[in-house]
Image (cartoon, rainbow, N blue to C red):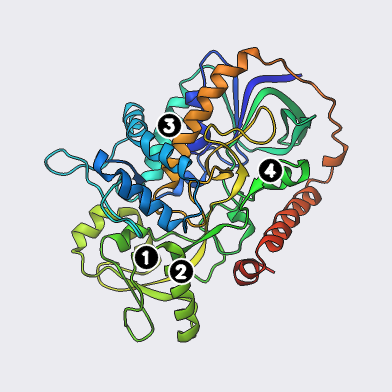
Amino acid sequence: MDKFDVIIVGTGVAGLFTALSVSPDFKVLMISKDKIENSDSYLAQGGICTLKEPADFDSFLEDTLRAGRYENNQDSVKVMIENSPMIMDRLVEYGVRFDINKDGTYEYTREGAHSTYRILHHKDVTGKEITNKLLNNVRERENITLKEYTKMLDFIIEDNVCHGVVIKEKDAVRAVYAKQVVLATGGIGGLFTHSTNFRHITGDSFALALRHGVQLQNINYIQIHPTTLYEEAKNRKFLISESVRGEGGILLNKKGERFVDELLPRDVVTEAIRKQMDEDGRPFVMLSIKHMPKEEIIRRFPNIYRHCLEVGYDLSKEDIPVTPAQHYLMGGILADTYGRTSVKHLFAVGETACNGVHGANRLASNSLLESLVFSERAGWIISEETENIEYGEPHVSLEEYKDIDAWDEKNRQIIMEEIKRRDGEFYDKWCDK
C-alpha cells in the first residue's frame, strides 16, 4: 500500500514552495498531470509584487482592494503584503535572480492599477526563473518524490477527513494514502478555447470539491486578460504581459486611435477592448510599443519580442494584434491564510485556493506573491501537525474510474454548470457552448 506523509498535487510555484516549507523529516509525494515544468507559474511574464518600503503599505493595500472591487478579504491581503519582503529574501536564497539597475539596486516595474513601481522581474520570464530555481531545490531534497504524467482522479475522503488521493500513472489506477493532502492544481484555463493556461489545467480539484462537498468560494470570479497575441489557431494564447502597457504600450482601434487608459484594472480594459472589437468588426485591437527603442524592447521583453518575431511581427516597427483570453481564477476552494479547507487534512494553495486576497479581480503580479506567501504558511502548519496524525485507510473501489474519459467529461460539466449557476451573464459572454 502506497503511503506518504504529505501528497502535493501540482508542481507550480505553490506546490514547490509548499514542499520546500514542509519539514524534511516528512516523506512527500509531488505529482503533476503533465511534464513537471508545465505549470502556469512557468508562463508568468510580468513579475512579482513586493513591499519595497514600509511607506508603500497603505498604497499597496488600496491598489489590491480597488482592483478587487473591495470584495477582498482584507486580513488575507495584509498577510500577503506583510510577508512579501521575507518571501523575496527566500527566493534570492534559492537562487532566483531579479533584474537590477546599473547601480546594483533592484529594477522595479509597474503594471495596470498599480499606483507606483513595486514589481520585481527577471526580464519577461519571471515565472520561469522562479519556477526553475524552486524546482532545482526540490530535486535536491531526498524526502521529496516527484512524479510527472501522474493524474489525480479523486480525493479519498471519509467523515470529512481527507486520507489521500486516487491517481492514474500510465495505465495503472490506485489509491495513495497520506496524512495531509495539498491541492496546488492551478485554475480552469483548459476548459476554455481561448486561454493563456496550459491545456491540461482543467480545474480537476474544483470538480472533485463539488462531488465531495468541499466548500468553494467565488468559482465564477474568472479573470479575462486584456492582451494576448491574436492568432487564428485555437491553441494556448501567448500572453502579452501587462508590463508592456506598464512601460507605455498603447491600445489602438481600427482607425489607429487610442481608446482606453491602458493602466486601468484588467477587467475594465478587457471590457473596453471587447466593445471596441465589436465596433471595429474584427476579433482584435492593436497594441503599439514603438515608442521604445529596439534595444530597450529586446532587453526588457526578450521572450515577447522573440515570439512576435517568429510569427511575423517586429515590435519595434509595427503594432501587434491582441485579444482578450481567459487567464486566471480569483475564486476556488475556500481556504484560510494557512491553506486549510473545510475538510480536515486537505489544504489548497495558489490559484486553486480562494483565501480572498484577489476579491473579484486580481491586481497584476499579485499571483506569484499570493501563491508563495500562503503555500509557505501551509507548509508551516503541515510541519507542526503531521507527526501527530494517524493514517486513515478507508477502502477505495476503483470501479468508477474504468472509463476515465467519461469521468473527465462529467468533471467538466460539473464545473461549467456551477459557473453558469453562479453567473449566467459571464457564462454567456465568455464560456464555450
Which quadrant of the view contains residue 373? top left
Residue 72 placement, left or right of 129: right
Give the quarter of the figure containing the C terminus: bottom right
Which tag, 2 or 4, sits closer to the chain's start? 4
Comparing 50 with 54, the one in front is: 54
Q: Secondary structure at mark 2?
A: helix
- Which residue type does callout 3 highlight? Leu
Q: Which mark is residue 264?
A: 1
Which tag, 4 or 1, sits closer to the chain's start? 4
Which quadrant of the view contains residue 192? bottom right
User: Which circle, 2 or 1, is nearer the viewer?
Assistant: 1
In the displayed structure, would residue 93 be above or below residue 366? above
Q: Which mark is residue 270?
A: 2
Residue 375 seen from this side? yes
Q: Secondary structure at mark 1?
A: loop
10 Å crowding of disc 1: few (<14), some (14-19), many (20+): some
- Picture residue at 77% right of the left edge, 41% below the top: 212
In the displayed structure, would residue 31 be above or below residue 405? above
Give the residue pinned by disc 3: 134
- Picture residue at 33% right of the left edge, 30% below the top: 95
Disc 4 to disc 1, C-alpha distance:
32 Å
Residue 352 placement, left or right of 89: right
Disc 2 to disc 1, C-alpha distance:
10 Å
